[in-house]
Image (tube, grey):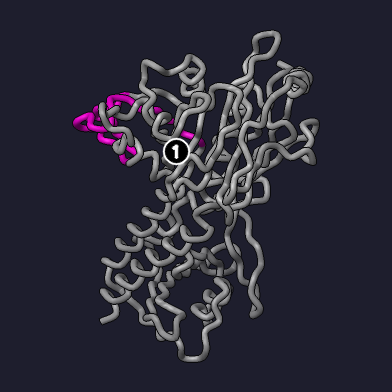
């Protein structure tokens, strides 16, 4: 099938990378190609996309103050394979719970002194085939998974591997043997893994010239066939009643957030789409507060645009919607379906992999679906590392570590 793009699978193998000045210290991370996807346009698709791009298409999204617009990079040729990686792929996998919990290891904690801590270090007591010991260094910035050579000065070497070089005596570590701490550390890791594997993306239907309130007021019987088709493409419509998988903040008991939603799995990730027309419509409420309560608190908002007029990202007033993705449907002369895509990121977040190539038009197929979902996930992960999101996460992480340290440093 010449028109289809292709993806190659992801492997979860790991490699070691040297780091540190004293001896060889290793950081575990995915192999270079372990989280790589390659997208290729087929010859038939290339011909059709060029034909579609020659139509007098208006911009999909308009320039707007406060936003970086990504609508296709002419320097990224469609004739070459578009390679991309998952950001922070290693964070999707459990480490302490699988390799340390209820096994021979030691946990050390240090209080917050001179702005360095609190820090919790876990070190495996079993030497592995690489001739070292596995370790985890937990700081306010995250978990650092390290490999430490030799028996001596293991805490110091673990800190160096995590990029921490405290002054002498600035950190006082205490060995904690209480099994309760192991359970607490496993619970902490579970929260972190779920944070990078569970996503909520808003989906909003937009007709030409609509205001924000009008978009949020579109009801299900107004939905276009193209919008329905797009929803079926990105996920599966599921009943919310007694739904026992990732809920995405929706009510699965009493239908207060609607009777159905759209859900999908993508590699290790679960995605719940907050679809505006599937959320409850409140007659007489111009703001549609119930719908905005969910969609307005999603980092990423997908706008399916009907009509030719460019979408203006500043029409969306939520401060939490940091990335607006605009999608529209194109139909070729031979009745094949393509999607045109543009991203608007608030300043502070640059575009994420996979980058949009010239024209940013893609055939509706499974390969593009994976490309699209990967870009959504990477875009949110990028946003979480930027600006106020990063500061909030760092403060929450610091509070968690302080509680654990104070509970055990007695």
Tell me the quadrant of the picture where the C terminus can be found: bottom left
Whether residue 264 is in magenta: the answer is: yes
Visible in this render: residue 263? yes
In the rendered image, the residue lying farthest to the top is 334
Visible in this render: residue 43? no
* Point 53% across, 58% down: residue: 386
Tell me the quadrant of the picture where the N terminus can be found: top right
Q: Is residue 127 left or right of residue 46?
A: left
Q: Nearer the viewer, residue 19 or 300?
A: 300
In the rendered image, the residue lying farthest to the bottom is 168
| The residue stretch that appears in magenta | 239-266
Q: Is residue 156 above or below residue 211?
A: below
Q: Position of residue 387 (x, y in %)?
A: 52, 60
Q: Position of residue 379 (x, y in %)?
A: 55, 46
- Secondary structure, mark 1, is strand
Q: Is residue 23 above or below residue 181?
A: below
Residue at the spot of label 1 = 201
Residue 150 is drawn in which quadrant?
Answer: bottom right
* Point 59% across, 64% down: residue: 27
Q: Is residue 68 above or below residue 18?
A: above
Classified by dominant secondary structure, the portion drawn in magenta counts as loop
Q: Is residue 376 above or below residue 103?
A: above
Q: Position of residue 15 (x, y in %)?
A: 63, 55
Whether residue 108 is in magenta: the answer is: no
* Point 51% across, 17% down: residue: 226
Q: Position of residue 5 (x, y in %)?
A: 69, 26
């Amino acid at each position: 099938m010449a028109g289809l793009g292709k993806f190659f699978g992801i492997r979860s193998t790991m490699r070691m990378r040297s780091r540190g000045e004293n001896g060889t210290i290793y950081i575990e991370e995915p192999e270079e190609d372990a989280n790589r996807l390659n997208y290729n346009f087929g010859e038939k698709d290339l011909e059709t996309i060029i034909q579609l791009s020659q139509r007098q298409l208006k911009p999909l999204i308009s320039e707007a103050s406060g936003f970086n617009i990504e609508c296709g990079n002419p320097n990224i040729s469609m004739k070459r394979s578009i390679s991309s990686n998952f950001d922070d792929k290693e964070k999707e996998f459990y480490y302490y719970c699988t390799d340390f919990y209820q096994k021979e290891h030691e946990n050390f904690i240090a209080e917050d002194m001179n702005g360095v801590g609190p820090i919790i270090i876990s070190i495996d007591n079993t030497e592995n085939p690489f001739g070292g010991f596995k370790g985890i260094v937990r700081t306010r910035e995250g978990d650092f998974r390290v490999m430490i050579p030799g028996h001596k000065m293991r805490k110091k070497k673990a800190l160096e591997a995590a990029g921490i070089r405290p002054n002498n005596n600035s950190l006082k570590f205490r060995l904690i043997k209480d099994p309760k701490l192991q359970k607490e550390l496993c619970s902490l890791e579970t929260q972190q893994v779920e944070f990078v594997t569970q996503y909520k993306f808003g989906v909003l239907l937009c007709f030409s010239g609509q205001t924000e309130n009008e978009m949020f007021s579109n009801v299900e019987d107004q939905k276009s066939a193209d919008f329905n088709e797009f929803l079926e493409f990105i996920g599966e419509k599921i009943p919310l009643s007694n739904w026992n998988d990732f809920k995405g903040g929706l009510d699965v008991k009493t239908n207060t957030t609607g009777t159905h939603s759209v859900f999908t799995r993508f590699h290790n990730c679960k995605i719940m789409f907050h679809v505006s027309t599937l959320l409850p419509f409140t007659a007489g409420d111009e703001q549609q507060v119930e719908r905005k309560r969910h969609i307005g608190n999603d980092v990423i908002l997908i706008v399916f645009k009907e009509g030719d007029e460019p979408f203006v990202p500043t029409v969306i007033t939520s401060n939490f919607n940091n990335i607006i993705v605009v999608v529209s449907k194109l139909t070729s002369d031979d009745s094949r379906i393509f999607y045109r895509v543009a991203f608007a990121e608030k300043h502070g977040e640059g575009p994420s992999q996979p980058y949009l190539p010239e024209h940013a038009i893609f055939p509706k197929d499974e390969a593009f679906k994976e490309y699209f979902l990967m870009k959504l996930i990477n875009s949110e992960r990028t946003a979480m590392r930027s600006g106020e999101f990063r500061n909030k996460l760092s403060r929450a992480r610091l509070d968690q570590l302080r509680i654990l340290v104070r509970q055990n440093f007695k």
